[in-house]
Image (cartoon, helix red, strand yellow):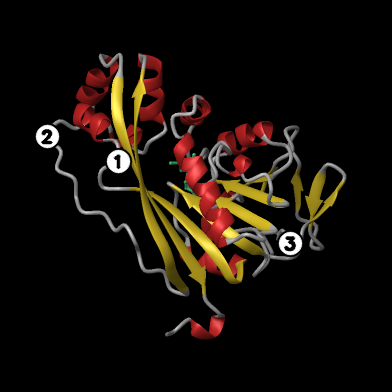
Amino acid sequence: MIQVICPVCGAALAPQGAAWRCVQGHCFDVARQGYVNLLTVTQKHSRHPGDTREMVAARRAFLDAGWYAPIAKTLADLVRRFCPAAEAVLDAGCGEGYYLSQLGWIPERWGIDISRDAVRYAAVRDRSAHWLTATAAHLPFADGGFDCVLCMFALTAGAEFFRVLRPGGIFVQVLAGQGHLPGLKSIIYPAHVEKEKMLHPALPGFGLLHTQTLRFSFSLPDAQSVHDLLYMTPHVWRITKQGAEALAQTAQLTDTAEVIFNIYGRQEAGNLLE
Ligand SMILES: C[S@@+](CC[C@H](N)C(=O)[O-])C[C@H]1O[C@@H](n2cnc3c(N)ncnc32)[C@H](O)[C@@H]1O
Ligand SMILES: [Zn+2]
């Protein structure tokens, strides 16, 4: 069983009625949808950190339409192959829960996200998993409990992932590749020259076991799905007025997804400095 810890004092948290409490008396309510908000005020850099409700709703519509089903399938295949006996998995930056909810054969599934709207959507999607509002930078879990940590298009907090994984556990990092969504980018940044990305970052305490690239095309049939694609990418934070206007004129879009899957193995603590 995974041990959740208090984000204030680090003591164990235990469910007690409709709340979770630690021995020091810190108390966190279980929301009606079943998730728990463990994000403290000091861990927030804004009132509503992470993806907005509009972004979460767009991601939900886009993913449920199945456009990224090949990513979910590749993820499931890799988790089965590299962690066949997984008992507990964590999805850090889980968004609205699409990917984690498809790993239903793993007995304990935990998703955390800094966006309360994302976690609320995830909790409604899948009541058989555990969902927390929390930051990947300070994971509210005791050391060494997880067999597998996923991080899909989200912040890689390598030291925290190392801490909560058991020795020999795996970290699955999923990144947008250099050739991800060229069609969308050519509309919103017509003069943009992409800078080189780090596709296989070295992570202290981890060894890279496997990497593979998934490429597939998809054709969005209407303006709503084009809008949803933009809103589920980080481009929505940096799009210019001209880019937004150009995209609003786009009624259909055929594009290519290029996604990198890196599987890292967590080494024994003694190997850390090698
Ligand atoms: C691009 S989205 C990916 C969501 C999901 N993994 C998916 O692929 O559908 C990135 C997610 O990371 C979350 N996020 C941003 N900073 C975070 C942090 N410090 N800790 C946890 N989640 C964070 C955002 O709220 C957002 O849901
Ligand atoms: Zn406490």
Label 1, residues with CA under 10 Å away: few <14, some 14-19, many ≥20: some
Task: Looking at the image, tell me whether mark 3 or mark 2 is earlier in sequence order.
Answer: 3
Q: Are marks 3 and 2 in contact (CB under 8 Å)?
A: no
Apparent side of residue 84 relative to residue 71 in the rendered image (left or right): right
Front residue of 176 and 56: 176
* Label 3, ligand 2: CB separation under 8 Å: no
Q: Which residue is mark 1?
A: 180
**Can residue 12 be seen in this snapshot?**
yes
The image position of residue 129, as x and y in percent, is 70, 44
Label 3, residues with CA under 10 Å away: few <14, some 14-19, many ≥20: some
Task: Looking at the image, tell me whether mark 1 or mark 3 is earlier in sequence order.
Answer: 3
Element marked by disc 3: loop
- The nearer-to-camera label among 2 and 1 is 1
Q: Quadrant of residue 25?
A: bottom right
**Amino acid under disc 1:** His
Spatial CA distance of label 1 from label 3 is: 37 Å
Q: Which residue is mark 3?
A: 3
Residue at 38% across, 50% down: 175
**Amino acid under disc 2:** Ala
Task: Looking at the image, tell me whether mark 2 or mark 1 is earlier in sequence order.
Answer: 1
Determine which of the numbered discs, if any, sits on residue 191 in the image: 2
Residue at 63% across, 63% down: 147
Q: Quadrant of residue 11?
A: bottom right
Q: How many marks?
A: 3
The image position of residue 90, as x and y in percent, is 61, 54
> Residue furthest toward the right?
17
Front residue of 257 and 250: 257
Element marked by disc 1: loop
Element marked by disc 2: loop
Quadrant of the rendering where the C terminus is positioned: bottom left
Residue at 52% across, 76% down: 267
Label 2, residues with CA under 10 Å away: few <14, some 14-19, many ≥20: few
